[in-house]
Image (cartoon, rainbow, N blue to C red):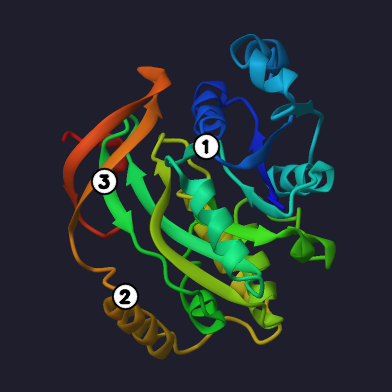
Amino acid sequence: MQPLISVITPSFNQLDWLRLAIASVADQEQVKCEHIVQDGGTKGIEESLRSQFNELTEKQRLTIFVEKDAGMYDAINRGLAKSKGDICAYLNCDEQYLPAALMRVEKFFLANPDVDVLFGDVILVDRQGRPLSYRRSILPTREHLRAAHLNTSTCATFFRRRIFAQGFHFDPQWKAAGDAEWMDRLLAHRLTMAVLPKPLAIFTFTGQNLGASAVSRSEEEGWKKALPEGPKRSRAPAILAHRLRKLLAGAYWPRRVNIEIFTLSSPKCRQPFAGTRVGFGWPSNPTNSAR
């Protein structure tokens, strides 16, 4: 029996980017998928989205809920509670799935019933959709997470419903560090995780990304300091071990990428970006890319 995949998108006043995220879920082929947009109160969002994605809403592949929430992680929890899928994920407004991403995820979970959480690779792009960097995923470790940062990307993170049913909800007290805190709990309970070394999603530097902000970095440091044992005094061993694992996984090699994504200038059909040579790092000034 083919599993249902539930994708949750928390949103608030990001309608232009949200349309692109919805389109990237809508054209995923050969999968059963429901997309729940959990919006915090964007004016006119229901009318706007239903006029553009009427066929999706009629088929109940896209459902829009507009209600006040306590922030992004509260919105994700609300969406997950409403969802029915066997495989779950959340996709922010500034992110998109690449073609066939969900089909690859479905096949992996069907072939590996013991896996609870799956990570994939991510391509970083600028506001125009031009590729900036290729981020190869490796399994996170609690030591590195607490010493440095969460090395996986939420747009390419997928998990089974049983995780949420077991009580692994996102903590709504956080505004930006909830991903790291959630992953720390999953790692503490030794859930089975795996990596699919394929590009599954893109993350767009819009200039307003919460996860790339100083607020996010500050909050994550605050979370580490609040841990019972406090922040790690010596970060070097965990960071060195992490970098060695990345080296062995081929994460540090430049590569050429070929992607098709939705852009602000092409919101209804995917725009190809072929043969772009990119590195592996986090861009220092991505919103001013001139390539």
What residue do we see at 68% from left, 73% from top? 186
Q: Nearer the viewer, residue 132 or 33?
A: 33
Task: Specify whether 286 is left or right of 234.
Answer: left
* Residue 226 seen from this side: no
Label 2: how many residues lie within 10 Å, few (<14), some (14-19) or many (20+)?
some
Occupied quadrant, residue 32: top right
Identify which amino acid the numbered label 1 is placed on: Glu
Rounded to the nearest angstrom, the CA distance separating label 1 from label 2 is 29 Å
Task: Specify whether 20 is left or right of 73.
Answer: left
Mark 1 falls on what kind of element? loop
Rounded to the nearest angstrom, the CA distance separating label 3 from label 1 is 27 Å
What residue do we see at 58% from left, 43% from top? 91
**Label 3 vs 1, first from the N-terminus:** 1
Mark 2 falls on what kind of element? loop
Label 3: how many residues lie within 10 Å, few (<14), some (14-19) or many (20+)?
many
Q: Which residue is mark 1?
A: 29
Q: Nearer the viewer, residue 138 or 213?
A: 138
Residue 111 drawn above or below residue 94: below
Across and down, in percent, residue 158 comes to: 60, 57
Task: Specify whether 186 is left or right of 279.
Answer: right
Identify which amino acid the numbered label 3 is placed on: Leu
**Label 1 vs 2, first from the N-terminus:** 1
**Label 2 vs 3, first from the N-terminus:** 3
Q: Which residue is mark 3?
A: 132
* Residue 11 seen from this side: yes
Q: Which residue is mark 2?
A: 249
Residue 69 drawn above or below residue 245: above
